[in-house]
Image (spheres, rainbow, N blue to C red):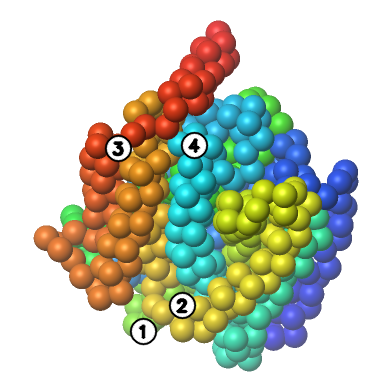
Amino acid sequence: MSTTMVWITITLYILIGIFIAFLSRVGKQNSMAGYFLGDRKLNGFVSALSYSATTYSAFMLVGLAGLTYNGGVGAFGFEIIYFMGVSLVAIFGPRFWLVGKKYGYVTPSEMLGDRYQNKWVAIVTALSSCLFLIPYSAVQLTGIGYLLEGGVTSGAISYTTGVIIATILALVFTYIAGIRSVAWTDSLQSLIMIIASTIVVLLIIDGLGGWNGFFDSIEKTKPEALAVPGNGFFNFWTFLGLTIPWFFFSISNPQVSQRLFMPSSMKSMRHMLLGFLIFGFIYTIVSVVWGLSATVLFPELDNADLATPILLSSELVPDLLGVIVMVGILAAAISTIDSILLTLSSLFSRDVYRNIMKHKQTTDQKQLQIGKIVIPIIAILAYLFAQLQLDLIAVLSVASSAGLIVVVPGIIGAFFWRKGTASGVIISVIIGSIFVIILEAFQLLPLGLKSGIWGIIISTILFISTSFITKAPPEDKANEFIDYLQVKLKKNSR
């Protein structure tokens, strides 16, 4: 594949992306809600594409394909569990949207801090999100580095160059118009991703003799790839450990749950969810087929995450189409990174800075200013983490989600348990986070269970037990919060 062609295509993508980002600069971006939530005015189509691009990042076409290469068809089951978890959006999405609109919440942590009437709830959950999301954003940079350095350019573009390109583009898209530019460039990126990658799948299947030839080839060269646990990678406990954090992804990851505040109406939110499900199912099939195809064509790869780059450079994929798909994956990763940059900067300015500083110094404009200052700092941290080049993108993504899962009991309690306490949230998040970090740092498996399972178990037990022995927030707030939702949801269901 010509390096010149790769650079020309990347340049065209950058120019078109920046043009679209500037077109999105409508209205004012001088408030927290305007810059980070698009003034809560995103329509269903843009919301669906942006939600999809933010969720399905380098993890999918690089990470999930690599996971399929490593463990076979069990990776499909792993991703389908996430699909089941999206049903949580049907439950929590309307609730997030309704309270966000009523109380003016900008971040999920702000919502929790207000619901439990304790600023430390907001601070602790925000810092926990920063701790685990920076490695996740680094995973996206790693995917781009592997993509450009691997089979696509055969080393002509270095890993570091790819990471730097992605970091700079994420910053540019973020700064032009905040979430508006991110959402509109996400929409472009989603369309590139889904169309080009689907065409590649059709070409690969045709090149391998159609669907019958495709599966016959797998059965002859690597039959264990079509079975679970197959080669043993997806044994029951490994599968459970990977899928539990992924099931709760839609509410535990703030860069995703924050998007539940953004649709212009409940109808737009329903369209967002439907569009995401269609997009996600197609994208899952594409990623798994890519991984299985690579096991047939390139059975001896040392690094499973190189399955996609090598596949795109094969004879089955025309060079131009391979480059377009490469840019689509680049765009997918950037769409996740810039969303994380915005979310983490809003968490820091809204939930950490505002609650620690004196109230008079924390106007909305001052918070926005602090948020913009923090964005490049977060990007640099992600870049430095990406330079570690840790293995298996998919596993690293789940490890980050394992840390984020500890806030789930507090979120569920906010909407459904009036007696949940601020102390319960704080203790469950702090101790749960520390426990997950220790397990991941030392690769420990107590009782054979991965960190994500322990994270949800420990945080749930601590949240419930601590709430029973500590004082709940003023009942007026809990009752107002939950009663308002019950009335509104009942009215909307008619």
Q: Secondary structure at mark 3?
A: loop
Position of the N terminus by quadrant: bottom right
Label total for image:
4
Residues tagged 2 and 1 counted as in contact (Cβ below 8 A): yes
Res. 464 image quadrant: top left
Q: Which residue is mark 3?
A: 470
Asked if residue 65 can be seen in this view, the reply is no
**Residue occupied by mark 1:** 302
Badge 1 element: loop
Residue flagged by tag 2: what amino acid is it? Leu
Question: Residue type at mark 4?
Answer: Gln
Q: Which mark is residue 306?
A: 2
Q: Residues within 10 Å of mark 2 (few under 14, many from 20)?
A: many
Cβ–Cβ below 8 Å for labels 1 and 3?
A: no
- Whichever of labels 2 and 3 marks the residue nearer the N terminus, that label is 2
Tags 1 and 4 in contact by the CB under 8 Å rule? no
Query: Would you place residue 469 above or below residue 307 in this image?
Result: above
Residue shown at 42%/32% (left/top)?
A: 473
Q: Which residue is mark 4?
A: 117
Residue 225 percent across, percent down from the top left: 28, 64
Task: Judge by depth and name the residue closer to the eye, 165 or 38.
Answer: 38
